[in-house]
Image (cartoon, rainbow, N blue to C red):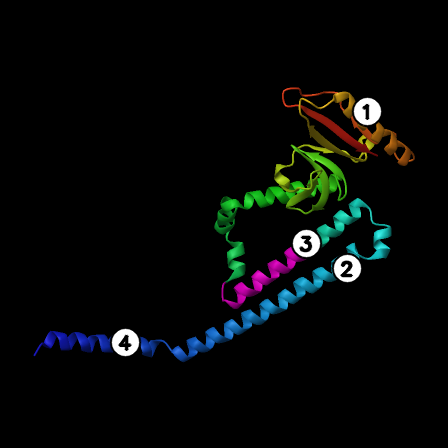
């Protein structure tokens, strides 16, 4: 008879019984189910608050006909910013509620300087820079929604502005997202003598194309547009006389003010 094997089996059985005695699996299962149900209900509640609140704010701040009549670019910018702040606030409260339900001491974590330093070191610097730059842009009124601006190498119309990024729609229809921290120099084409919009088009020509006929066609269109928009602009279409011969590209700029 192998006494060592029997002793090992007895020891294992005792350890298992001790673990079962120390841990009440019924209570563990009940706690998990209870916390899980609470988390699901909390998620549903915040989801409804998020979407219903956003829809109501959008309806009454951006799509209300009475507001649209008096809505300027700056007011639209502030309205969209208010909606974004509402969403961020709901998200923060949701995360706080979930962590609290999971038994995580949120207050202790927030008070921990080491954790804050770690968060900053893991990429929060970019978020902080975006927010600070966004607040500066907003306070200075550098541009508003609907303005035509040039930021870096991109020129387009401002579609939206938040404390994190600026969204532009370029003349070719592309939508560009620019983090606010990357915005250093802004040229607002909607202010002063540059107010209006413009579009650059490059005509790819072949060697056989007659430049004189092309100039005549552009002048004809220019004259027609001037008559059509004579009360709005002195220049509707302008032909840039430079011709890049090696590539046979004729730059044309549409200008409407």
User: Which is in the foreground here, disc 1 or disc 4?
Assistant: 1
Disc 4, disc 2: CB below 8 Å? no
User: Which is in the foreground here, disc 3 or disc 2?
Assistant: 2
Between 13 and 40, the one nearer to me in the picture = 40
First in sequence: mark 3 vs mark 2 = 2
User: Which is in the foreground here, disc 1 or disc 3?
Assistant: 1
Compared to 20, does 230 lie above or below?
A: above
Is residue 65 visible to us here?
Answer: yes
Q: Residue 137 at what x, y percent from top left? A: 71, 40
First in sequence: mark 1 vs mark 4 = 4
Mark 1 burial class by Cα count in 10 Å: few <14, some 14-19, many 20+: few
The structure residue drawn at horizontal position 54% and vertical position 55%, both measured from the top left corner, is 110
Cα–Cα gap, marks 3 and 2? 16 Å
Residue 228 sits in quarter: top right
The stretch of residues the image draws in magenta is 85-104
Q: Is residue 106 left or right of residue 253?
A: left
First in sequence: mark 2 vs mark 1 = 2
Q: Residue furthest front?
A: 208
Q: Is residue 155 left or right of residue 110?
A: right
Q: Is residue 55 left or right of residue 29?
A: right
Disc 3, disc 2: CB below 8 Å? no
Q: Residue 195 at what x, y percent from top left? A: 81, 34
Mark identifier at residue 85: 3
Cα–Cα gap, marks 3 and 4? 53 Å
Find disc 2 in the rendering and name its residue. Answer: 59
Find disc 1 in the rendering and name its residue. Answer: 216
Find disc 4 in the rendering and name its residue. Answer: 16
């Amino acid at each position: 008879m192998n006494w060592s094997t029997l002793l090992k089996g007895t020891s294992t059985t005792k350890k298992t019984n001790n673990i079962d005695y120390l841990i009440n699996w019924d209570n563990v299962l009940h706690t998990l189910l209870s916390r899980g149900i609470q988390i699901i209900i909390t998620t549903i509640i915040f989801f409804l608050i998020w979407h219903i609140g956003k829809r109501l704010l959008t309806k009454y701040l951006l799509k209300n006909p009475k507001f649209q009549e008096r809505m300027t670019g700056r007011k639209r910018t502030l309205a969209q910013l208010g909606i974004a702040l509402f969403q961020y606030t709901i998200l923060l409260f949701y995360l706080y509620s979930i962590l609290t339900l999971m038994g995580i001491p949120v207050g202790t974590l927030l008070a921990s300087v080491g954790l804050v330093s770690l968060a900053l070191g893991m990429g929060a610097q970019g978020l902080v820079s975006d927010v600070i730059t966004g607040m500066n842009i907003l306070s200075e009124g550098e541009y508003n929604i609907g303005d035509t601006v040039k930021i870096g190498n991109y020129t387009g119309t401002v579609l939206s502005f938040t404390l994190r990024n600026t969204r532009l729609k370029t003349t070719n229809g592309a939508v560009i997202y620019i983090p606010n921290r990357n915005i250093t120099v802004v040229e607002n084409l909607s202010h002063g003598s540059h107010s209006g919009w413009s579009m650059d088009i490059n005509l790819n020509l072949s060697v056989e194309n007659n430049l004189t006929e092309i100039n005549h066609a552009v002048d004809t269109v220019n004259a027609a547009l001037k008559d059509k928009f004579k009360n709005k602009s002195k220049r509707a279409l302008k032909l840039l006389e430079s011709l890049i011969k090696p590539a046979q590209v004729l730059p044309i700029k549409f200008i409407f003010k």
